[in-house]
């Protein structure tokens, strides 16, 4: 499949019936041409699947809904990678809310700085559904020595990141031996050039802009 310029949003879901409708709505409001939504239901045993099907029914956007046996978010993301059509991937957990301008902002900043991976800010809040994101035009910047800083201080989060499709596929996608990819993925991207002499050094960026909130 030829990868085109745009954004593929991957949402992983396991028993998120309390949150999934709001999570998807905040994404659907940002959908436009050259955007794709891939939802992976990772063997939910609650009403998540039914709620998703009802919400996306008759939507005219490019939406792919995958249902599979429970195996964890890392394997679910790799499953979704087979269907990705666009140059940039936005990961979203099934209970997080992304900022109203998150997709366009992150894509634009990654293009401007030619980034392979961009992290924005995130917060835990009690009431995600009614969270009021403030207008914030903070510019992203290159994160120097990202790998060393990830190792020393730790790093996490997936709903606050965007990654180039080519970069993620080059490192082999998510490590399926690691259940949650929040720390593994940035290490794989930022440290790829250290594995072998001729490996490309990927460019990591940071932004202070609030990209998502989680419960």
Image (cartoon, grey):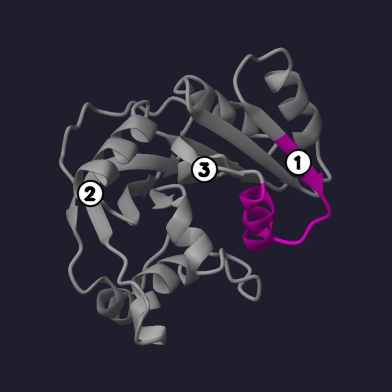
Mark closer to the chain start, 2 or 1: 1
Q: Are marks 2 and 1 in contact (CB under 8 Å)?
A: no
**Badge nearest the viewer, 3 or 1:** 3
Q: Is residue 74 magenta?
A: yes
Q: Is residue 124 magenta?
A: no
**Badge nearest the viewer, 2 or 3:** 3
| Cα–Cα span, label 2 and label 3 | 26 Å
Which region of the structure is painted magenta? 65-82
Q: What kind of element bears circle 2?
A: strand
Q: Dot 3 surroundings within 10 Å: few (below 14), some, or many (20 or more)?
A: few
User: Which residue, given by chain and number where applicable, does mark 1 sit on?
Assistant: 66
> Residue 37: image x %, image y %?
58, 33
Mark closer to the chain start, 2 or 3: 3
Q: Is residue 125 visible?
A: no
Q: Quadrant of residue 58?
A: top right
| Cα–Cα span, label 3 and label 1 | 20 Å
Q: Is residue 49 left or right of residue 152?
A: right
User: Which residue, given by chain and number where applicable, does mark 2 sit on?
Assistant: 207
Q: What kind of element bears circle 1?
A: strand
Mark closer to the chain start, 3 or 1: 3
> Residue 152: image x %, image y %?
29, 81
Query: Residue 43 versus residue 173: which sits nearer the camera?
Result: 173
Q: Residue at x 61, y 25 (%)?
A: 62
Q: Which mark identifies residue 3?
A: 3
């Amino acid at each position: 499949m030829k990868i085109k310029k745009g954004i593929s949003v991957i949402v992983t879901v396991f028993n998120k019936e309390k949150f999934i409708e709001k999570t998807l709505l905040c994404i659907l409001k940002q959908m436009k041409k050259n955007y794709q939504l891939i939802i992976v239901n990772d063997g939910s045993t609650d009403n998540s699947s039914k709620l998703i099907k009802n919400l996306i029914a008759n939507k005219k956007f490019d939406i792919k809904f995958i249902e599979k046996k429970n195996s964890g978010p890392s394997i679910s993301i790799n499953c979704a990678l087979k269907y990705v059509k666009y140059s940039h991937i936005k990961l979203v957990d099934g209970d997080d809310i992304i900022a109203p301008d998150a997709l366009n902002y992150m894509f634009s900043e990654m293009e401007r700085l030619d980034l392979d991976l961009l992290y924005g800010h995130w917060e835990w809040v009690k009431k995600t559904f009614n969270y009021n994101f403030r207008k914030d035009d903070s510019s992203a910047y290159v994160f120097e020595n990202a790998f060393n800083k990830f190792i020393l201080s730790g790093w996490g989060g997936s709903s606050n990141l965007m990654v180039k499709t080519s970069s993620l596929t080059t490192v082999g996608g998510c490590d399926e031996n690691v259940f949650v990819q929040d720390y593994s993925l940035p290490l794989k991207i930022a440290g790829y050039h250290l594995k072998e002499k001729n490996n490309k050094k990927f460019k990591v960026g940071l932004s202070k802009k609030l990209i998502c909130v989680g419960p």
